[in-house]
Every structure is written in structure tokens, then in C-alpha cells.
Image: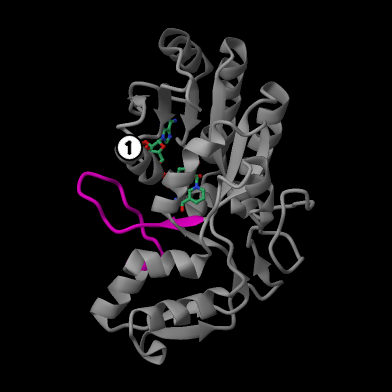
């Protein structure tokens, strides 16, 4: 990691990219082309840009991250979420550059197993976004076996000036408190929910991981309703006034996309370590 200085971030204007670039700018020299300056879906543009910039690491965060939008626009999702990874993997392989990029825990959304899921379970995602992330993982490992794909969970943070912030767990919650409108949370859903600060803190350790696919975020054994109840309690609120159980969502099967962090923890010799979702929420509040 000590030899890594120059990092190219794609998607630096996004929720994750903006926070990574801001938080780590004292440690690295960042190159942060805008979408207009580098369209990652164009193989020619990517090739020219990487050939000129020659970073030590490509941190590929550009994507279409809105799962609903991807469901309605699968061709756009394919371009942004699969072709972009192919293009960057090809350039990384050609120039011997480390590629680290964000996949998603949504690759697990068709799984029927319960408990924390590890990377070696067979996955069969049920939506375009999850299928495209999985396909991108497969293409990246073929084109650039040394690349690192991080299966990120749903991330949260407060709004920050000049930074993109989409709706996330803590903002939805805060809006509900302010509006006095209770929120419904699924009892049949299990997922990790991770503070972006924990993602940023752990990210530099991914630059040294052996190539492969890694879960990357908070473990959580509670369902989403239970998580919200505990988050209300952490804030000293009466959960019943703000959190309601949604027992109808995910009728086909329990949606379990909760990740196990064992692989990244072991591969990084304990350096990559996330607090659990509840521990992260407690730290966020304090
Ligand atoms: N946010 C989450 O909770 C979450 C959870 C799991 C995984 N992820 C993954 O984490 C990564 C970062 O997510 P995010 O939340 O930061 O996404 P985001 O806020 O939606 O930002 C996406 C970024 O990609 C850029 N972009 C889109 N298409 C592009 C193209 N063709 N060429 C160049 N740039 C392009 C956007 O620029 P413009 O706005 O200028 O188009 C924007 O900067 C993504 O791979 C996402 O799938 C996110």
C-alpha cells in the first residue's frame, strides 16, 4: 500500500466517490474525471484516458446505482454496470494497474439461505442490477484476474455540502421523525447497512487484497424492522411511534442479502474490519 500514490476515481461526483475523494485526499493524489471528461462505457475513451494518466490504482465507482432505474432501463444498466467494468479491467490488465471496483450485495437477492452469506455461495440474482453486477464480476475476473470486486451493502451518511447524497437509511429515518410519519420496515428482509465512514476507512486495505470478489460492509443478523427498532432506541425514541413492521414485503421468500466479512478479514490479516450495522449506527449517532 505504501507504493500507491496516484489513484484514478471514476464516479467521483457520486455518493461514495465524493466522500472517498474528500476523506483520503491527504493520503493520495486523486485523478477525478467527471462523467463528461471520461465516459466509462466507451472503451476507446477509457483506453486513451488510462494510457495517459497511468494511475497506480483505478477505483471504479461510476455506475447506475439505482436498482429501480436499472429494472426499467436494463440496456443502460448493462452499459454502465457491465461494459464499464469490462473497459476498465481491459485497461488495468494492459497497463498493470490495480483495479478495485464496487459490486453489490444485491447479487445475493435470489438466495434462499438464511444467515450471513459468504462469497462462495451460489448466487442467482432476481433483478437486472444484481444480474449485471454478477456478470461484471465474472467479466472482470476473466479479463483482469488481479482485480478486486467489493460487494458493498446499502450505505448511509448525512447530507454534506457539495456532495451527492441519495436517500438512505438515516435520512429516511430523520425525515420520518421530522414529518411525524412512521416508516414501515420489512420483517422478511435481512441486510447489512453500513456507514460510509467505515467504508472509506477500510478502502485502502483493499488495494493489497489478492484478486477476487469480497463482501465489503457491515454484518447484520437483525431483520430490517428489528434494525430500525434498535436505531430508534439508540436515539432515545419510542420505536412504536416511528417504526412499523411491514410483513407483506418479499412474499416469495425471505430476502436475505446479509454478508459475512470473514473472507476480507482473513485475506487482509485483520486489517479490514467493520463494526456491525448496529455498532455503526451507534457510532454515527455519537
Ligand atoms: N450507494 C449505495 O448504497 C451502494 C450500495 C451497494 C453498491 N453500490 C455501488 O457503489 C458504487 C458507487 O455508488 P454511488 O452510490 O456512489 O453511486 P452514485 O451516487 O449513483 O454515483 C454514480 C457516479 O457514476 C457516474 N457515472 C454514471 N455513468 C457514468 C458513465 N457512463 N461514465 C462516467 N461516469 C458515470 C455518475 O456521474 P454523473 O452523475 O455525472 O452521471 C456518478 O458520479 C456503484 O458501483 C454502486 O453500484 C452503492
Residue 272 coordinates in the image, percent (x, y): 56, 46
Q: Is residue 141 above or below residue 231?
A: above
Circle 1 SS class: loop
**Which quarter of the rendering shows the C terminus?**
bottom left
Residue shown at the point (48%, 19%) measured from the top left: 56
Residue shown at the point (61%, 42%) measured from the top left: 133
Residue 131 coordinates in the image, percent (x, y): 66, 46
Residue 125 coordinates in the image, percent (x, y): 69, 53
User: Within 8 Å: ligand 1 and the Cβ of disc 1?
Assistant: yes
* 58 displayed left or right of 13: right
Q: Is residue 129 visible?
A: yes
Main SS type for the magenta part? loop
* Residue 132: quadrant of the picture: top right
- Say few, some or many: other residues with alpha carbon within 10 Å of mark 1 (under 14 / 14 to 19 / 20 or more): many
Q: Nearer the viewer, residue 151 or 35?
A: 151
Residue shown at the point (63%, 43%) measured from the top left: 269
Residue 280 coordinates in the image, percent (x, y): 44, 64
Q: Is residue 248 above or below residue 275?
A: below
Q: Is residue 31 visible?
A: no
Q: Nearer the viewer, residue 78 or 84?
A: 84
Magenta stretch, residue numbers: 154-171
**Residue sitting at the far left:** 161
Asked if the magenta segment contains residue 165, the reply would be: yes
Residue shown at the point (32%, 37%) measured from the top left: 13
Asked if the magenta segment contains residue 25, the reply would be: no
Figure quadrant, ligand 1: top left
Q: Which residue is mark 1?
A: 13
Total marks placed: 1
Amino acid at each position: 500500500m505504501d507504493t500507491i500514490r496516484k489513484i484514478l476515481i471514476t464516479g467521483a461526483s457520486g455518493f461514495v466517490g465524493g466522500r472517498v475523494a474528500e476523506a483520503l485526499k491527504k493520503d493520495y493524489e486523486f485523478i477525478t474525471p467527471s462523467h463528461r471528461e471520461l465516459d466509462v462505457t466507451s472503451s476507446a475513451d477509457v483506453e486513451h484516458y488510462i494510457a495517459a494518466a497511468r494511475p497506480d490504482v483505478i477505483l471504479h465507482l461510476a455506475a447506475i446505482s439505482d436498482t429501480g432505474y436499472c429494472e426499467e432501463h436494463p440496456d443502460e444498466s448493462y452499459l454502465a454496470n457491465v461494459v464499464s467494468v469490462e473497459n476498465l479491467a481491459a485497461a488495468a490488465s494492459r497497463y498493470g494497474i490495480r483495479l478495485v471496483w464496487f459490486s453489490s450485495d444485491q447479487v445475493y437477492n435470489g438466495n434462499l439461505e438464511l444467515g450471513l452469506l459468504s462469497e462462495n455461495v451460489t448466487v442467482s440474482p432476481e433483478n437486472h442490477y444484481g444480474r449485471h453486477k454478477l456478470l461484471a464480476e465474472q467479466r472482470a475476473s476473466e479479463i483482469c484476474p488481479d482485480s478486486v470486486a467489493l460487494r458493498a451493502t446499502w450505505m448511509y451518511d448525512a447530507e454534506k455540502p457539495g456532495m451527492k447524497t441519495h436517500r438512505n437509511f438515516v435520512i429516511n429515518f430523520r425525515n420520518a421523525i421530522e414529518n411525524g410519519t412512521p416508516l414501515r420496515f420489512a420483517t422478511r428482509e435481512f441486510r447489512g447497512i453500513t456507514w460510509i465512514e467505515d467504508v472509506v476507512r477500510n478502502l485502502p486495505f483493499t488495494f493489497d487484497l489478492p484478486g477476487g470478489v469480497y463482501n465489503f460492509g457491515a454484518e447484520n443478523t437483525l431483520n430490517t424492522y428489528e434494525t430500525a427498532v434498535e436505531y430508534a432506541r439508540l436515539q432515545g425514541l419510542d420505536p412504536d411511534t416511528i417504526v412499523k413492521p411491514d410483513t407483506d414485503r418479499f412474499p416469495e421468500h425471505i430476502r436475505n442479502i446479509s454478508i459475512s466479512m470473514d473472507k476480507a478479514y482473513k485475506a487482509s490479516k485483520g486489517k479490514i474490519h467493520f463494526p456491525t450495522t448496529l455498532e455503526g449506527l451507534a457510532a454515527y449517532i455519537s
